[in-house]
């Protein structure tokens, strides 16, 4: 982060403001970039144009508007791009002199070899607030209350073990909650583990013998008050394949429910109110803030990332 002043660093570190720079972000799916003209996209406030060259390789350049200064006549800025595992990753750094020092993160392979479901929706909030929805374990019974998923009346006390891993944390493998109908249709004795990684990746990996289900959530900050959620589902389980049309409908319902809550929150969040986090149910939100600040600190100081999370068992009701 050479050349970045302390005021900019402090702004990025505050919750609900700024972005995590010097990181790879999912800009598009590979499918979205097949054929057609280049796609215009705003990513971390930067206006980009993403397309393919004559060789078929993906590229991302600064999308200059009429009247923009193209960096002293040097042409639009080019951003490093990598296509990997069905996604187009773009390296975002505030300082154009900072090149990627590592490849994009490797996500768990989609169990079926390719995703069977990809859905997207934009949330009208800063990425920090959008990520809270990923790591809040207790919102399900209140936001996603359907008879075919989980009823609020079935909420009960839970204890889950966590440990640090990479640039985030994971919920160790365990038997899923008995009050969730979704796992019951899989049969057998399913086990699940849940991961969160900076800058905004969360996935749940379910194992039923040799069969698997993978649910991947990706938060991509577009602007300071707009975040794109990409939900991906893959599976080698025949029941999941059979229920794919219903799962797509259910996914859309869940995403719209989360979007509705965020639209209701957005006016108050615009004033950056202090967050009140209580008990173990909000511990993952606190961890996210610590991870974010550590990433900013390690880039500023030119050192390796040191995960600030310690192994711990959390308790909540949902």
Image (tube, grey):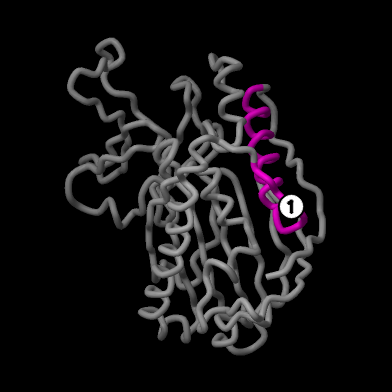
Rendered location of residue 125, percent (x, y) = 46, 45
Q: Nearer the viewer, residue 215 or 264?
A: 264
Identity of the residue drawn at 72% across and 69% down: 317
Rendered location of residue 269, percent (x, y) = 52, 41
Residue 292 inside the magenta-drawn segment: yes
Left or right: residue 212 compared with residue 72: right
Identity of the residue drawn at 55% across and 36% down: 272
Left or right: residue 15 compared with residue 100: right
Toward which corner of the image does residue 196 lie, by quadrant? bottom right
Relative vertical location of residue 292 with respect to residue 120 in this rendering, above or below: above
Q: Nearer the viewer, residue 153 or 200?
A: 153
Q: Residue furthest top?
A: 72
SS assignment at label 1: loop
Quadrant containing the N terminus is: top right
Rendered location of residue 250, percent (x, y) = 42, 74
Q: Nearer the viewer, residue 10 or 312?
A: 10
Quadrant containing the C terminus is: bottom right
Residue 261 inside the magenta-drawn segment: no
Label 1 CA crowd tier, 10 Å (few <14, some 14–19, many 20+): few
Q: Which residue is mark 1?
A: 278
What is the magenta segment's predominant secondary structure? Answer: helix
Toward which corner of the image does residue 120 lie, by quadrant? bottom left
Q: How many marks?
A: 1
Rendered location of residue 9, percent (x, y) = 59, 23
Relative vertical location of residue 248 with respect to residue 7 in this rendering, above or below: below
Span colored in magenta: 275-300
Left or right: residue 310 compared with residue 277: right
Q: Nearer the viewer, residue 242 or 270?
A: 270
Identity of the residue drawn at 54% across and 17% down: 4
Identity of the residue drawn at 47% across and 20% down: 97
């Amino acid at each position: 982060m050479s050349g970045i002043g302390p005021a900019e660093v402090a702004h990025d570190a505050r919750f609900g403001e700024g972005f995590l720079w010097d990181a790879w972000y999912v800009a598009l799916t590979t499918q979205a970039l097949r054929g057609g003209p280049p796609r215009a996209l705003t990513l971390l406030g930067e206006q980009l144009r993403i397309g393919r060259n004559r060789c078929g390789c993906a590229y991302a350049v600064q999308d200059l508007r009429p009247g923009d200064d193209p960096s002293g006549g040097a042409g639009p800025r080019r951003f490093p791009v990598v296509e990997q595992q069905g996604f187009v990753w773009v390296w975002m750094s505030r300082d154009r002199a900072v090149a990627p020092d590592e490849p994009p993160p490797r996500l768990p392979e989609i169990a079926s070899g390719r995703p069977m479901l990809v859905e997207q929706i934009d949330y009208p909030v800063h990425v920090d607030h959008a990520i809270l929805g990923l790591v809040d374990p207790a919102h399900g019974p209140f936001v996603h209350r359907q008879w075919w998923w989980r009823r609020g009346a079935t909420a009960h006390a839970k204890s889950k073990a966590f440990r640090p891993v990479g640039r985030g944390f994971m919920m160790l493998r365990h038997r899923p909650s008995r009050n969730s109908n979704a796992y019951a249709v899989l049969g057998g004795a399913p086990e699940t583990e849940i991961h969160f990684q900076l800058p905004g990746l969360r996935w749940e990996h379910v194992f039923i013998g040799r069969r698997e289900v993978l649910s991947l959530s990706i938060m991509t900050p577009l602007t300071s008050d707009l975040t794109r959620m990409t939900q991906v589902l893959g599976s080698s389980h025949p029941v999941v394949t059979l229920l794919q049309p219903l799962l797509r409908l259910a996914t859309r319902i869940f995403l719209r429910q989360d979007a509705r809550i965020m639209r209701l929150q957005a006016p108050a969040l615009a004033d950056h109110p202090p967050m009140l986090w209580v008990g173990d149910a909000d511990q993952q939100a606190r961890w996210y803030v610590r991870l974010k600040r550590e990433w900013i600190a390690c880039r500023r100081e030119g050192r390796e990332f040191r995960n600030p999370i310690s192994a711990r068992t959390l308790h909540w009701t949902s």
